[in-house]
Image (cartoon, grey):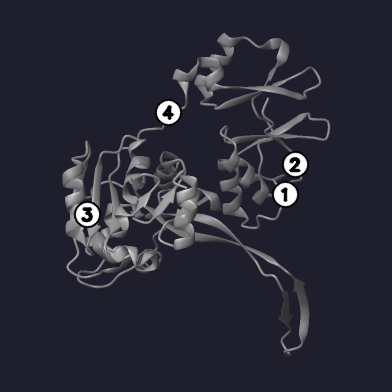
Amino acid sequence: MKDITISPDITIRVAMELLDKTAEKILLVVDDKKKLIGALTDGDIRRHILKDQDMSKSIEPAYNKAPFFVYQEDIDLRKIKKIFSRYKLSLIPVLDKNRSVVDYLTLENVFGKEKRIEKKKILAPVVIMAGGKGTRLKPFTNVLPKPLMPVGGKTIIDHIIDRFREHGIKDYFLTVNYMSRIIKVFFEEKNPDYKIGFADETEPRGTAGSLNLLKDSLTTPFFVSNCDIIVEADYADIYEFHTKGRYDITMVAATKQFHIPYGVCELDDNGRLGDIKEKPEYNFLVNTGFYVLNPKILEMIPDDEVFHMTHLMEKIKGNNGTVGVYPISENSWIDVGQWDEYKKALKIMGNI
């Protein structure tokens, strides 16, 4: 059995790193005698982060204290199949008579490979913001538009679209400006089995301004993605989070940890040293450039004006609207528009 057991004393950040490494996407919390005391999923961590952003704390308040399990001697595959199907589980731990974890069951080893968890279908269009000049990737983007930069044998935009296609999405819109003709020719030659439309910016209009060009084409909540990011997450869960929360816009945010390699001084009101923190670490949630928006808010975007997503969110809040935040782990987001991250993407995708 691959060890997916963890101690209740580990931190939220460590748990996120472990979840990123396991295909099962669930960790079993055990005591020092390997007895099962809980289970932890990325959903549990996400809900905890929204309440408390301090990822240096233990997982104790975050994990599920009453997970499904089955005793080793009571395994009945017929009943197990019913439990998997009824409760939409991905894993069930197997315990011995002392409640120690000895194994676990997954959909695949109960039903066979044909019963792998399928991506939930989403009925929503996608807008990809592909009009930028890709300044951070020069000189390559002097001759090739950023969306067509190769990553692991495919273009960046193919990687983005493929992740949405796993959820059955067939309607895509690209906002284009810089080298727009090259992008259009690429899709003409590709002749994809999905619908692709274009919104032409006559001049740069910011990270939200060009959405105004599509307001007559978007009538249901829709995804927006920058053209230089790769997000590994459950897109159906993001969409459900948005709709169930009744948000006007949902921003996907990645956890980021910054380590200061010095002693940081904190001053009191008189300018004297109050405290000094030795090599502190700070945790933040940062904007990934991936969103879900309600179509009605497009009316808030002005015509012929540079207007960013930050402006739109401020305007929504100023009109008593709501902005949701969906946290993901740092390793679930790659900003391919930066050279260091681009090289990281090449390694992950097996290009080097």
Is 179 displayed left or right of 233 in the figure?
A: left
Cβ atoms under marks 1 and 3 closer than 8 Å: no
| Amino acid at the residue labelled 1 | Ser
Under circle 2, the secondary element is loop
Residue 58 marker = 1
Q: Position of residue 161 (x, y in %)?
A: 32, 44
Under circle 3, the secondary element is helix
Report the residue at 69% width, 31% height from top.
3
Residue 8 marker = 2
Report the residue at 65% width, 58% height from top.
54
Cβ atoms under marks 1 and 2 closer than 8 Å: yes
N-term mark: 1 or 2: 2
The residue to which callout 3 is attached is 183
Q: Residue furthest bottom?
A: 270
The residue to which callout 4 is attached is 118
| Amino acid at the residue labelled 3 | Ile
